[in-house]
Image (cartoon, rainbow, N blue to C red):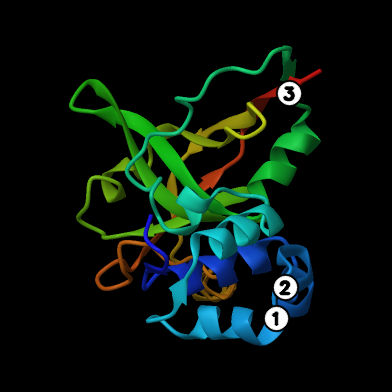
Amino acid sequence: MSDGLHTSDLGRRLAFRRQELGLTGEELARRAGMDPRYLEYIEQNPTAVVTHSALVRLAVGLETTPSALIGGEIERPPGIGRPGPRPVLEELEERQCREHLHPGGVGRLVFVLDGDPAALPVNFRLVGNEVVFRTKPDSTLGATIGQRVGFEVDHIDEATSEGWSVLLHGTARSIDDPAELARVSAAGVEPWAGSEGRTLFVAIPIEEITGRRIRQQ
């Protein structure tokens, strides 16, 4: 690596990960051993130049990797790291499964398409007892209305060789009532693929839910 690394996305990734951990700029600066004003400059300036040493210290402070901060892991599939030395597979209780769903995020809708199994990623929110996402009315996802479907969410931490997965089943339905639409809209269901044309809100009532976790002893 050269003396300085230019990356237009670094500041955005720093700010996102910092907020994800609930850290202020001053707290992260202390963790990374740098001036808070320099950290603020990095987060706000897309043309900021960051040394390799500073990047490593920021990664340590944010409990992640330098590669993740500069977007080097976007194209890499998760879970290709080695398993930990003493893995333990545990079943999650229903309460724990719901806790993993509560923040929302990206999950996979599992359904039958032309007689074959299919799975597509969507970003979702948990609203009451239902997983909610948005799609286009004439889309493949929109065609799942009335079908019994599965919905899977997982997370893998390759640094600790730990992770979890949650799987639920329910019958997909459309949300048409104006009061209910206002409630789920307020929950912030925003498709990563863009909101244009994605006017159909789909809800999956949680009828069955199971989960598993891998931890290290």
Give the number of the mark in front: 2 or 1.
Answer: 1
Seen from the viewer's position, the closer of residues 142 and 77 is 77
On residue 120, which mark appears? none
Mark 2 residue crowding within 10 angstroms, few (<14) / some (14–19) / many (20+): many
Picture residue at 81% right of the left edge, 18% below the top? 217
Asked if the residues shown at circle 3 and circle 2 are in contact, with their CB atoms under 8 angstroms apart, the answer is: no
- When asked about the image quadrant of residue 146, the answer is top left
Identify the amino acid type marked 1.
Answer: Asp
Q: Residues within 10 Å of mark 1 (few under 14, many from 20)?
A: some
Task: Give me the residue at 53% from left, 53% from top.
Answer: 105
Q: Which mark is residue 35?
A: 1
Residue found at x 40% / y 50%: 122
Instruction: Describe the element under mark 1 as helix, strand or loop.
Output: loop
| Distance (Cα) linking label 3 and label 2 | 30 Å
Q: State the residue position of label 3.
A: 215
Q: Nearer the viewer, mark 3 or mark 2?
A: 2
Name the residue carrying label 2. Answer: 29
Q: Position of residue 206 (x, y in %)?
A: 61, 39
Identify the image quadrant of residue 25.
Answer: bottom right
Q: Earlier in the sequence, mark 1 or mark 3?
A: 1
User: Please, is residue 141 above or below residue 165 in the view?
Assistant: below
Front residue of 205/87: it is: 87
**Residue type at numbered disc 3:** Arg
Q: Secondary structure at mark 3?
A: strand
Q: Is residue 189 above or below residue 208?
A: below
x, y percentage for residue 60?
67, 53
Q: Is residue 29 visible?
A: yes
Q: Secondary structure at mark 2?
A: helix
Q: Position of residue 88 (x, y in %)?
A: 74, 14
Q: Earlier in the sequence, mark 2 or mark 1?
A: 2
Q: Nearer the viewer, residue 16 or 1?
A: 1
